[in-house]
Image: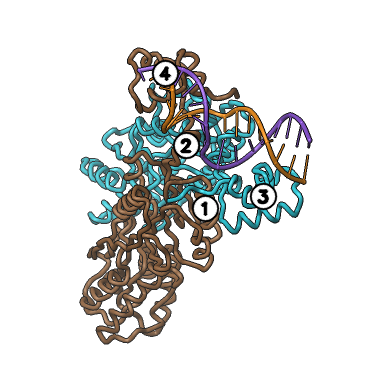
Chain colours: A brown, B cyan, C purple, D orange
Amino acid sequence: MNRDLTMKDIAERAGVSVATVSRVLNNTKPVSSELKKKVLDIVKETGYKPNALARSLIKQRTGTIGVIIPDMDNETFADLIKGIELITDRNDHVILVTNTMGEVKKELEMFNLFEEKRLDGIIFSGVSLTEKHIDFFEKYKIPTVLVGQTFNKLDFPSVTIDNFQASFDITEYLIELGHQNIGMIRGPLYDIQAGKERLLGYKTALRENDYPVNNDFIIEGDFTITSGYKAMEEIWSNELKPTAIFSASDKMAIGALNYCLDHGLKVPEDVSIAGFDDMELATAVRPALTTIHQDQVEKGIKTADILLDLIEKEEKESYNIQLPYSLIERDSTCARK
Amino acid sequence: MNRDLTMKDIAERAGVSVATVSRVLNNTKPVSSELKKKVLDIVKETGYKPNALARSLIKQRTGTIGVIIPDMDNETFADLIKGIELITDRNDHVILVTNTMGEVKKELEMFNLFEEKRLDGIIFSGVSLTEKHIDFFEKYKIPTVLVGQTFNKLDFPSVTIDNFQASFDITEYLIELGHQNIGMIRGPLYDIQAGKERLLGYKTALRENDYPVNNDFIIEGDFTITSGYKAMEEIWSNELKPTAIFSASDKMAIGALNYCLDHGLKVPEDVSIAGFDDMELATAVRPALTTIHQDQVEKGIKTADILLDLIEKEEKESYNIQLPYSLIERDSTCARK
DNA sequence: CTGTTAGCGCATTCAC
DNA sequence: GTGAATGCGCTAACAG
């Protein structure tokens, strides 16, 4: 494979200097229309493509944003990325995506690589913050914004929703429907937002309404459908059965729903089930899921906006933006009979 | 924001030449352990990160692969990317992903950008091939492999499944169940594989079994749940009703399923429904969907393997690899009563 | 308007 | 083993 065409080649063929070629290509300084045409013709004829590496090396801008997420094979993150892309696209940026599956090692590797590649900025969605992260960020200089989590030990802006309040709200909604025994399928506690905060919201709602928190009714899942199924199985093995289940994710809620359907339990007549996220799945299923809606695309948009802004201003800032959420009542919940 | 540290800075601080620093960083030539230690210490102390842009400029390798897909907010493509990442990750490559939403203009823009960025290779999943594509690829030099589609006018390897045969198989399966009136929710015909080929497989199966093709039973959708719902509504508005529906995607099948469930039709007793793809959705739903399983992660792996190989060998090749698929019988289909 | 030149940060040949 | 010098391809002064 022969060497790429360079600007020098174009300059020679057009009988001009490289500076002139650069000028017509970037519209950076006036060039006589005569020469301009000549250059453009040769460019088209040869299919010359400027080398973005060389350009970036000089301009100290790569026009690319790194996105570090746990797993994009998850509608939630896929939507987030779409939102991000909406903005980066509009600003002639492109995104480098990487799935970490929550592994801290991979996260740090990618941060490192992204620094070497001199990305303009990074969007990070992690689930937990370790000492290793903190150490790493000591000498870290790339503009970064966090999504889904907020690490107050770090000097990064973040965008989330109020997971505590949302869980509180939906639990209270179930209470208002007359349910007294409400189970929860929660996430792992190292996940501060989707795990811990959502559990806290649920517990707090119960306590404020003078209902006891029954630990037999609180089972941990890992946000998958399967784990929701198993969690429901476990909850249902108790002597006392709850009449409503709040799940920290739609997928686990679907798992619970399927357990019910497969075992002759009617939803919502026998058990009400509520989810969290409002993924496409939530409406694809019958009965459609009552859940907390959050707009991931919007979250991506907001995050990218902040990042681009951060890159522009070149100064550190740290704040948390909480996006709105809403409770969507569908067919999987009803008043306790 | 102050200038990045360069190799020169490290060299000065360590009292050695830049060449030496380069050597210890890349392990490219022996360096006395004394100097090596000194350099390494300073690197760690300062948090120096080599500039990958400069390195790539020299080595003519960026270590990044471009991925152009219609929409990663689609489990199918998300899985594909995961497969790709599995391989690129193992080979110290990183991926630049972009969603085109099927827009030819965006596709071409990205190809262009990826060329400028001197990516090592590109994986392309488009839905149709236009004259514009062909023109563009005239002067195109980046190693590229196609997934999901095969364009025999282009000199690129491709990996797909045999969509015609798979559709043929599942239609025949429905016929064997005793169904005589089988409807189909198809995709747009400009989508050669998922649209045209799957329709063809269906029609051919009917014809070979001497069943007439009834156009009232063939409705076009756009692969979304909603479009499947509407398509089913339309099919059901006919005087004569089919007893089985084959949908060119799981999502449209779910839409059809929901139409049935919402209108008191029992699945599979009243209508059998079969999908295509075997997404997570297919098992999340009740009744679970009979469908054609294809392993997207495996497809991504295979594609990336081929691409990396292509990059290595530096020679053009063109062939199509068809991955296996399988018919998975679940609860949404049964023998006609 | 146009051309010449000096780097951007690094890898690598060539001397020593 | 080590250092000095060249160039990867391009942009941005600097002259003219």
- Label 1, label 4: how many angstroms apart (C-alpha)? 37 Å
- Position of residue A182 measured from the top left corner of the image (x, y, whole percent): 31, 78
At mark 3, the secondary structure is: loop
Residue topped by disc 4: A44
Tell me the kind of residue under disc 3: Gly
Q: Earlier in the sequence, mark 1 or mark 2?
A: 2
Q: Chain of mark 1?
A: A
- Label 1, label 2: how many angstroms apart (C-alpha)? 24 Å
Q: Residue B109 occupies which quadrant of the picture?
A: top left
Same chain for marks 1 and 2? yes
At mark 1, the secondary structure is: helix
Same chain for marks 2 and 3? no
- Label 3, label 4: how many angstroms apart (C-alpha)? 49 Å
Q: Nearer the viewer, residue A7 or B247?
A: A7
Residue topped by disc 1: A110
Residue topped by disc 2: A58
- Position of residue B132 measured from the top left corner of the image (x, y, whole percent): 38, 23
Tell me the kind of residue under disc 1: Met
Residue A262 in sight in this render: no
